[in-house]
Amino acid sequence: MKRLLTVALTAMLILVLAACGGKESEGKSSNGDGSDAGEEKVIRAGIGLNDKHPQYKGLLKFKEIVEEKTDGSIKVETFHSGQLGDDRTMIENLQINSQQVVIPSTAPMANFVPEFSVFDIPFLFPSEDVADQVLDGETGQKILDKLEGQDLKGLAYWENGFRDLTNSERAVSSVEDFKGLKIRTMENDLHLDAFKELGANPTPMAFTELFTAMQQGTVDGQENPYATIYLQKFYEVQDHVSNTHHIYSPFVFLMSKTFFDNLSEENQKIVKEAAEEAGKYERKLNREANEKYLKDLQEEGMEFTEITDEAREEMKKKVQPVVDEYKSKIGEDIVDEVYKAVKEASK
Ligand code: KDG
């Protein structure tokens, strides 16, 4: 009798262990039958911007679609304002699957996949429409695919937008006015070198540290789209805004590759399509926001300086040596391919 009991207990133990062990490492779906049925999964999704920003509204849309289409078997927990860390930290969280989604700008992504800097070449995209065509096209996908080697899955491109300069020192209307301005840039060498070439004194810094740095005067200024400048209340610590539109910043919707690979094909399709659909929604909200907020910034007392086409052309010429230098660092082929795609899409 005792022997029988031992055998039964051992068998049950093996069964339980097999069931637990398989959950994480087995790859495609835990039930081995291609479905995740009965298995609840949680996506922890974090961003750097606050809950007023179109990026967060887009994330709530992603949550809504995923939870609806999976009948709640995949839950999405959302965190804003850098609650899970700055962009670099959150990207590293994805690599160890302690977080499952983050949506950073392409600029900090270049520290993980250098080719992402191609999208941060100053004055590359003439419009949002051209950017959409290139990013959602073959070239955009080719660069997303390079993330696999970093244990990251790129599911879609969202929009941060055209970046404009603000500062607390003086109105900036030409290259000369950049001279000696202490500008915070994102953690991206191309951004840093471009602002150095313009004569400014740039500092790379995480977004989570930016407001305090401006408040304490550690930096004189920064550059972001109007929606971010307004919704993050930068007008409380900045006096001047110029429509430099010097770089179009895409966001990249990233997922942990381990988490993605552990989903059934059906759920992989759902999260991919949800990221794309919510991305289109976010872009629309973001463009309406950027339209609206320049006026609101002026109502909050910021002085707006219109950059003339000549002055913008002067800036473009001034940073060209840096762009030429980065062509080889990013990869000649991919840079040529993106310029060709921009030309094509601009027709
Ligand atoms: O959530 C995204 C932000 O963390 C960041 O990418 C915003 O454009 C940005 C910046 O200036 O850091």
Image: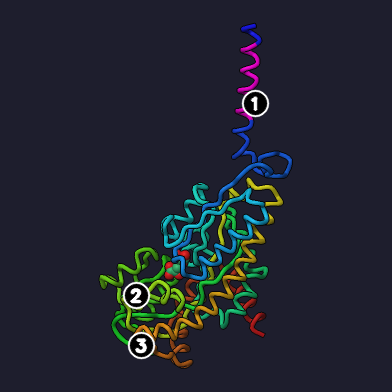
**What separation in Å lies between label 3 and label 2 (alpha carbons)?**
18 Å
**Can residue 278 be seen at all in this image of the molecule?**
yes
Q: Is residue 187 above or below residue 220?
A: above
Dominant secondary structure (helix, strand or loop) of the stretch shown in magenta: helix
Question: Label 3 is placed on what type of residue?
Answer: Glu
Q: Is residue 30 left or right of residue 48?
A: right
Residue 15 is tagged as: 1
Instruction: Characterize the local packing of mark 3: few (<14), some (14-19) or many (20 or more) Cα atoms within 10 angstroms.
Output: some
| Residue stretch rendered in magenta on the structure | 5-18
Q: Front-most of 27 and 149?
A: 27
> Most extreme residue toward the top, as rendered?
1
Of labels 3 and 2, the one closer to you: 3
Instruction: Characterize the local packing of mark 1: few (<14), some (14-19) or many (20 or more) Cα atoms within 10 angstroms.
Output: few
The residue labelled by disc 3 is 303
Q: What quarter of the picture does the C terminus occupy?
A: bottom right
**Can residue 328 be seen at all in this image of the molecule?**
no
Which residue is drawn at the image coordinates 63% and 45% (left, top)? Answer: 262
x and y percentages locating residue 184 in the rendered image: 36, 71
Tag 3 or tag 1, which sits nearer the N-term? 1
Question: Label 1 is placed on what type of residue?
Answer: Leu
The residue labelled by disc 2 is 183
